[in-house]
Image (cartoon, rainbow, N blue to C red):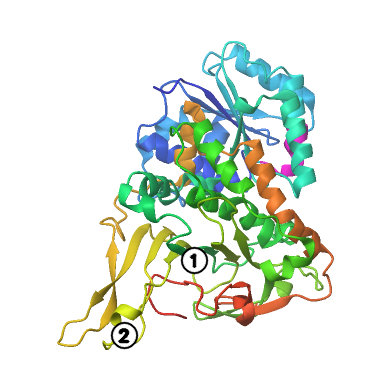
């Protein structure tokens, strides 16, 4: 049973709170999942009363909820809403917040602080929380939820972590990666470890290579300041894609508790072969989208987006080849790819098995045996698919690919947003789907050589037309000529 708590949102009037947090809390309220007595306290510079805050939340939620707006559910949520006027840089505002929680019986003493703010404000906010005594677990627990990016590179991540740990212990810090809250990502664990028939095959003896793709048809969506300073490698590869790689590659944990699960993920990440500085171009590829057509409409190129410098060489597409040097995966390439303004929105883990021996069928009509694939689609459709070879009907022996789908493929009767699941985990104190510091640090070590190499290459960057699957020569990181990107769930090469 979840204990009642006060859920404090720093940046309560910002984009993240409006688009993700408040809708997630509303849907949890609608599903009767929020604990009795829980309070939601917004913290911001607006001088709003509780009633004004409630009206703002209602206006925010109406166009963003799933299905029809449930007034009864919102009325229940509204009774939980409180607001505290304050400035993140002013320690007196935090003392006022502490006094408000101490004196208001509607605000439970268990407190979760959600940093829905700029990463530049993380250190100041943590320091001011400590100065007001709000990090001390007197009369209840304290939990600090930190959004990515967790640093800008390895050095900045270490500095940020040192600051946070000066005021909060590791068990109090919840580094949120919303990707890990997606049901299909969690299903990777069940698929791998609940099906005994797969375990003997899940290694370098049978698997040829693994692909992890996250593509978006959208551009930078008005985030020019953030994105031009980050790029695709920092924004997606260092966080989301390396986390999915760890889930695919990790060894079975002793238990599905937070520490056992995260221990095995860290072991997998630490086993990734370092990329030498002089080998970056053989292992990594970057590009930037130009003008093109998306959904039948012409869209501008990256350099034409508002707020982007005309000489920017920030990558909007990044692909990477990694090797995991352990007993299970030695010699198996892991290909990671992400990009903006690509042909479709898609997140897929594609696992290709080695080619079967051809000699057996040498006197038949089979010219080429296609390999088996396991496909795990994370979005926009959650699906698990296995591709097998079967005989075509008729007298001659010919093969074709058939697809075995999990029964829920294409079904959306049960919907839950990743943030809803993760917010419940924060309240329950379950850190299984949150990142530990050594995971963050190890992931930065993987991409840091690439960041350093690309930072010196400011004169040229490859381009690709918006609405496509990326640049033409992006295949060059592949080990073999018969490797190709699985862009869709169909069995055809692009």
Instruction: Residue 114: give x, y in percent of width and height.
Output: 61, 34
The N terminus: image quadrant: top left
Dot 2 crowding, Cα within 10 Å, few <14, some 14–19, many 20+: few
Image location (x, y in percent) of residue 222:
66, 61
Q: Is residue 30 visible?
A: yes
Q: Nearer the viewer, residue 399 or 91?
A: 399
Q: Residue furthest front?
A: 359
The dot on residue 345 is 1
Tell which circle, 1 or 2, labels the residue nearer the N-terminal end. 1
Q: Nearer the viewer, mark 1 or mark 2?
A: 2
Front-most of residues 214 and 418: 214
Q: Residue at x 61, y 50 (%)?
A: 239
Q: Mark 2 falls on what kind of element?
A: loop
Label 1 crowd (10 A; few <14 / some 14-19 / many >=20)? some
- Asked whether residue 123 is drawn in magenta, I would say yes
Q: Quadrant of residue 231?
A: bottom right
> Spatial distance from mark 1 to mark 2, Cα to Cα?
41 Å
Q: Is residue 235 above or below residue 281?
A: above
Residue located at (57% from left, 18% from top): 141
Q: Which residue is mark 2?
A: 362
For image coordinates 68% across by 33% down, the residue present is 47
Mark 1: secondary structure: loop
Residue 314 visible in the snapshot? no
Q: Which residues are magenta?
A: 117-125
Instruction: Judge whether residue 289 is colored magenta.
Output: no
Q: In the drawing, does residue 343 fall left or right of residue 31?
A: right
The correct choice, above or below, for 213 with respect to 343 in the image is: above
x, y percentage for residue 140? 56, 15
Q: Which mark is residue 26?
A: none
């Amino acid at each position: 049973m979840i204990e009642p708590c006060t859920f404090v949102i720093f940046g309560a009037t910002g984009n993240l709170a409006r688009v993700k947090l408040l809708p997630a809390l509303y849907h949890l309220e609608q599903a009767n999942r929020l604990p009795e007595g829980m309070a939601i306290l917004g913290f911001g510079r607006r001088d709003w009363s509780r009633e004004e805050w409630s009206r703002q939340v209602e206006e925010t939620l109406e166009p963003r909820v799933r299905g029809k707006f449930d007034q009864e559910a919102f009325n229940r949520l509204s009774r939980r809403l409180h607001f505290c006027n304050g400035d993140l840089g002013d320690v007196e505002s935090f003392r006022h917040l502490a006094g408000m929680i101490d004196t208001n019986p509607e605000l439970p003493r268990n407190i979760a602080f959600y940093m829905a703010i700029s990463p530049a404000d993380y250190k100041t906010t943590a320091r001011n929380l400590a100065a007001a005594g709000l990090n001390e677990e007197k009369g209840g627990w304290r939990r600090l939820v930190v959004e990515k990016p967790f640093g800008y590179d390895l050095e900045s991540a270490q500095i940020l972590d040192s600051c946070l740990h000066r005021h909060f212990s590791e068990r109090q810090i919840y580094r949120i990666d919303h990707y890990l809250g997606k049901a299909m990502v969690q299903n990777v664990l069940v698929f791998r470890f609940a099906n005994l028939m797969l375990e003997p095959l899940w290694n370098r003896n049978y698997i040829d290579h693994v692909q992890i793709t996250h593509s978006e048809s959208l551009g930078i969506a008005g985030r020019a300041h953030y994105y031009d300073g980050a790029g695709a490698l920092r924004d997606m590869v260092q966080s989301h894609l390396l986390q999915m790689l760890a889930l695919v590659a990790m060894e079975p944990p002793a238990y599905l508790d937070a520490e056992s699960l995260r221990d095995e993920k860290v072991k997998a990440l630490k086993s990734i072969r370092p990329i030498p500085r002089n080998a970056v171009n053989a292992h990594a590829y970057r590009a930037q989208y130009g003008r093109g057509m998306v959904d039948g409409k012409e869209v501008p190129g990256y350099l034409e987006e508002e707020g982007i410098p005309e000489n920017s060489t920030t990558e909007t597409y990044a692909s990477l080849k990694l090797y995991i040097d352990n007993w299970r995966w030695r010699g198996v390439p892991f290909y990671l790819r992400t990009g903006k303004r690509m042909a479709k929105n898609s997140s897929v883990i594609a696992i290709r098995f080695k080619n079967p021996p051809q000699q057996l069928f040498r006197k038949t009509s089979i010219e080429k045996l296609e390999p088996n694939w396991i496909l795990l689609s994370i979005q926009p459709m959650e699906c698990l698919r296995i591709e097998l070879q079967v005989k075509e009907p008729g007298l001659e022996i010919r093969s074709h690919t058939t697809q075995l789908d999990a029964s829920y493929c294409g079904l959306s009767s049960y919907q839950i947003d990743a943030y809803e699941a993760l917010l419940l985990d924060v309240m329950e104190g379950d850190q299984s789907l949150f990142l530990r510091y050594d995971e963050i640090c190890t992931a930065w070590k993987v991409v840091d050589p690439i960041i350093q190499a690309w930072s010196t290459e400011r004169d040229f960057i490859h381009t690709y037309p918006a609405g496509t699957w990326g640049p033409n020569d992006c295949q060059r990181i592949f080990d073999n000529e018969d490797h190709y990107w699985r862009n869709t769930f169909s069995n055809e090469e692009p």
